[in-house]
Amino acid sequence: MNKNTSQQLVLKEVQNSPLVVKNQKDLYLKKGDDPLSSGDTQKYFYFVISGKIKIYDIDFQTSKEQTLYMLSHGDMFDVVSLLDGKPNQYISEVLEDAHLIQVPLDDVKQMILKDEKFRQYFYHYIASQLRSMEDLAISLSFYDVYQRVVQLFTRFTQTIDGKTKLRVIDNLSHEEIASMVGSVRKVVNRTLQKLKKDGIIEVSRKNIHIKNFEKLLESLNT
């Protein structure tokens, strides 16, 4: 079972679970909204059905942003607040119109205790988020911007029936990509031009496509 199929099954189970169906609420968000305040995540947990939401932090003195998570179909938020009961200080922004399911924290905790299938998926999701944050920390500490972008593209590339596709981040602006790799647009532009020149990606109408995934993997070691 691939990741997308697993996500779809879990989301379907969440939407129909007797533990949450009574108290869950559908939220439909517009591009540009800031939907997930710290107060909300102390009371509610969110499942992303569709759309795209950026979770980031910002240094208000320098205006520099660092994207921490890019949430899309199958993602959950906020796992940390659910586990430790403390508010986060992150900022959220809807990048594409989104549909979320809002569920009270206590109901989600009951699902973790009583629903084995959801519990297994939840633990797997925590592990993937921890791995993502570890990779981000290592990338920012040890690698240049070119390597960070290559790692980012590798992480978000999905292979189905032998075909590779960049998902979630394929239509982000260069500013957004820079925010994800801890850089600035000008430097990211140079990196994308090099990847394009090397035949690894192609860019059309603000969309980025992986042209040669093997070469992308090879460039991880250059």
Image: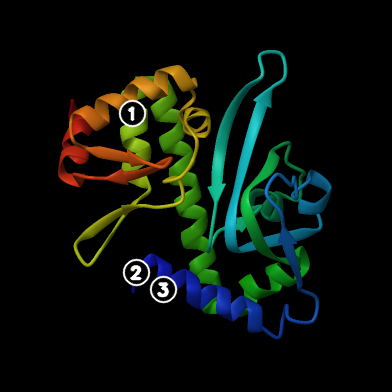
Can you tell which quarter of the image residue 140 is in? top left
SS type, badge 3: helix
The extreme front residue here reads 205
Which residue does the numbered mark 3 point to in the structure image? 5
Q: Position of residue 70 (x, y in %)?
A: 54, 46
User: Which residue does the image show at 43% across and 72% down from the upper left?
Assistant: 6
Give the number of the mark in front: 1 or 3: 1
- Structural distance between the alpha carbons of marks 2 and 1: 29 Å
- Structural distance between the alpha carbons of marks 1 and 3: 31 Å
Of residues 199 and 60, the one nearer the viewer is 199
Q: Amino acid at mark 2?
A: Asn
Question: Which tag, 2 or 1, sits closer to the chain's start?
Answer: 2
Q: Position of residue 131 (x, y in %)?
A: 43, 45
Tell me the number on the disc at residue 45: none
- Up the image or down, 8 lies above or below 44; here it is below
- Up the image or down, 9 lies above or below 146; here it is below
Q: Position of residue 5 (x, y in %)?
A: 41, 73
Give the number of the mark in front: 2 or 1: 1
Q: Assess whether mark 3 and mark 2 are in contact (beta carbons under 8 angstroms).
A: yes
Left or right of residue 159: residue 107: right
Quadrant where the N terminus is found in the figure? bottom left
- Structural distance between the alpha carbons of marks 2 and 3: 5 Å
Question: Which tag, 1 or 3, sits closer to the chain's start?
Answer: 3
User: Which residue does the image show at 33% across and 39% down from the upper left?
Assistant: 203
Of residues 163 and 89, the one nearer the viewer is 163
Left or right of residue 131: residue 111: right
Quadrant where the C terminus is found in the figure? top left
Which residue does the numbered mark 2 point to in the structure image? 2
Which residue does the numbered mark 1 point to in the structure image? 192
User: Which residue does the image show at 41% across and 18% down from the upper left?
Assistant: 187
